[in-house]
Image (tube, helix red, strand yellow):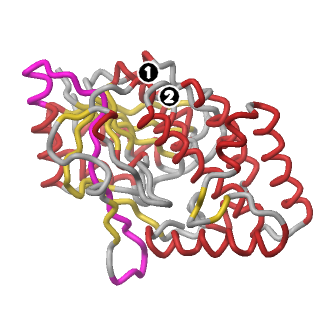
Amino acid sequence: MKLLTIAIPCYNSQDYMEKCVQSLLPGGEEVEILIVDDGSKDRTAEIADRLEKEHSGIVRAIHQENGGHGEAVNTGIANATGEYFKVVDSDDWVNESAYQQILNLIRRVVEEKQELDVLFSNFVYEKEGAARKKVMHYHHALPIGEFFTWEDVKSFRVGHYILMHSVIYRTELLRECGLKLPKHTFYVDNIYVYYPLPYVKTMYYLDVNFYRYYIGREDQSVNEKVMISRLDQQIRVNQIMYDSYDLTKIENKKLRDYMYHYLEIVTVVSSVLLIRGGTKEMLQKKKELWQYMKHSNIKMYHKLRYRRFLGMTINMPGPLGRKTVISGYKFCQRIFGFN
């Protein structure tokens, strides 16, 4: 029996994918590593096949037509045999000692037949050229080292939220909730984390620095210039998240508050990048995004429109309002190290 399936979406990843896989191999026979080659045009497929031969029973290569990061994750979920499921991007890696602690906990959960829907851990921004590595932890928001429910979750800070790097979901929960990520769309990791949340009942936060999130390539999807060039995809993700649930009908207040918080951050990112795009067309798209939300769900729109982001509403009108929102966004960039 596999405790954990780790899916590695790969597209033209020949230069760094092997480092990622090597960091995962210490999991041994209890771990299944799925290398999902998403129609790569370089040596990715060849490397994946070689790694499968070298590590039979642990590594499996899956080849598919190009469908984007989300479709590669979908393929991983569909083929997973592990009790729990983790996505590790091909240019990232994991810390071995934290990895063993993760596996020890999952093993105990499975052997003792405990209920656990999602396991959280910390991640580290491995930002190229940064003197200090920023650790993203959840000490202030989540109970440490114990099983808990939404009732035990505290408030998250402004600009701070749970990313894909931090989560390990129970595999069957991902299937039960009907998660299906859109094809050919970047930034679907937000949907991946957000959509299953109403199905999550039991959680555990292991305070270890497990995931190493590399930032530094100019072509990386989270590079701000790249994000601005792909704003239509960011907006699509924003709209999918907005339409996924009527949050006014989520009964659990802690869950509802966190989902509003997450949606707020994604909407702030969309709005700020549209402002920073610097054209009339971009400002019109920003207006259209907010109009879309208004017409889609007026109650959620008013709740989101007047939420406070660093003491201000997140859709302040006019040049001064836009400048103020950008200043708040830059503050969060410095604090949390993203982009």
Residue 326's disc is: none
Classify mark 1: residues with Cα within 10 Å, few (<14), some (14-19) or many (20+): few
Q: Which residues are magenta?
A: 107-131
Q: Is residue 244 visible?
A: yes
Number of the label disc, if any, that sits on residue 74: 2
Q: Secondary structure at mark 2?
A: helix
Q: What x and y, as percent, mark residue 283?
A: 85, 61
Distance between mark 1 and mark 2 Cα atoms: 6 Å
Q: Residue 174 location, x and y as percent? A: 42, 24
Residue sitting at x 82%, y 33%: 295
Quadrant (top left/top right/bottom left/bottom right) for the N terminus: top left
Front-most of residues 246 and 77: 246
Q: Nearer the viewer, residue 260 or 50?
A: 260
Q: Is residue 19 visible?
A: no
Q: Quadrant of residue 4?
A: top left
Q: Nearer the viewer, residue 223 or 267?
A: 267
Label count reads: 2
Give the side of residue 324 with respect to residue 178, left or right. Answer: right
Q: Amino acid at mark 2?
A: Asn
Callout 2 environment at 10 Å: few (<14), some (14 to 19), or many (20+)?
Answer: many
Q: Residue furthest top?
A: 176
- Whether residue 20 is in magenta: the answer is no
Image point 23% across, 44% down: which residue?
Answer: 205
Residue at 63% from the left image edge and 67% from the top image edge = 224
On screen, residue 128 versus residue 225, left or right, reads left
Three-letter code for the amino acid on which mark 1 is drawn? Ala
Q: Is 114 in the magenta?
A: yes
Residue 237's x, y, as percent? 65, 41
* The C terminus sits in image quarter: bottom right
**Residue wearing tag 1:** 78
